[in-house]
Amino acid sequence: KPNQPVSMKDANKFLLGSILDYQIPAETAWGNAKRLSENILGDPDKLWHKVTSVTLSEWQSKRKEYSLHRFPKGHERVWTIGRRIVQQYDGDARKIWDTHSIEVTLYRLTDLGVGEQISRMVVGALIDTGQIKGKGDVKVDIHVRRVLGRAVLGHEFSLQEAGRVIDLTREMHPDNPWLLDRPLYLLGKQVCEAELPKCASCFLQSICVYYNTQ
């Protein structure tokens, strides 16, 4: 709930879902996070202590059984990031953002190895729920890259052009670019699809380079 203190258990589960939300569908990532934390590990408060109570090699041996991520690295990073959270923050994800500073939180997340784009998503969610205050940037995922790229270029932005996407969204919504994240994501997922985009249903069609050059 917005502006309400969050428990260690919920904070840890939230961060687990965020870490898994990497090159797999978001609904799959969050479903797998819930299944791991609640069904497999027994819904512990000290989730990261539980994850890292086995060795890395033991954790890796559980990849097929747990089926958390399609890539071995996606499975491994749950343990490696979890280990750092235990060592640096006593296994309590809330301590990562306890200063309520966006800059410090971003630094701490990237230092843990969460990744630049996922760190932005985490910060945005913390802003949405009132855990920290300020403005954030969009998570430059495939949907955001496709929508903005098609609108302004006629084709999606590449992975290497994430910086251009950030700059563009900062120009579009200087007060808080993060507020563009959800509408762009939903537009890309539901309307501006990779194959057969539903351009007739898109509110950007009048200014979209892609639509107007077909």
Image (tube, helix red, strand yellow):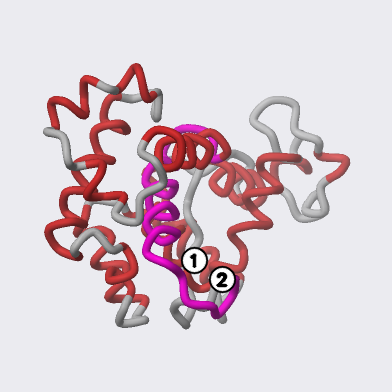
Furthest-right residue in view?
Answer: 200
In the rendered structure, which amino acid carries the disc numbered 1? Answer: Gly
Marks 1 & 2, CB-CB < 8 Å contact: yes
Q: State whether residue 51 is above or below residue 112.
A: above
What residue is pinned by disc 2? 128
Query: Residue 114 — which label?
Result: none
Quadrant of the rendering where the N terminus is positioned? bottom right
Quadrant of the rendering where the C terminus is positioned? top right
Q: How many marks?
A: 2
Report which quarter residue 89 is drawn in.
bottom left
Q: Residue at x 22, y 40 (%)?
A: 79
In the rendered structure, which amino acid carries the disc numbered 2? Answer: Asp
What residue is pinned by disc 1? 124
| Relative image position of residue 7 (x, y in whole percent) | 43, 67
Report which quarter residue 92 is drawn in.
bottom left
Viewer-proximal residue, 53 or 118?
Answer: 53
In this rendering, position of residue 38 left or right of residue 99: right
Per the rendered image, the range of residues in magenta is 1-26
Q: Residue at x 69, y 34 (%)?
A: 193
Q: State whether residue 12 is above or below residue 74.
A: below
In this rendering, position of residue 154 left or right of residue 116: right
Viewer-proximal residue, 142 or 22?
Answer: 22
Report which quarter residue 58 is drawn in.
top left
| Relative image position of residue 108 (x, y in whole percent) | 24, 66
Q: Residue at x 82, y 53 (%)?
A: 203
Q: Residue at x 59, y 47 (%)?
A: 153
Viewer-proximal residue, 148 or 118?
Answer: 118
Furthest-top residue in view?
Answer: 64
Q: CA distance from mark 1 to mark 2?
A: 6 Å
Secondary structure under badge 1?
Answer: helix
| Relative image position of residue 24 (x, y in whole percent) | 47, 32
Let me know if residue 165 is in the magenta part.
no
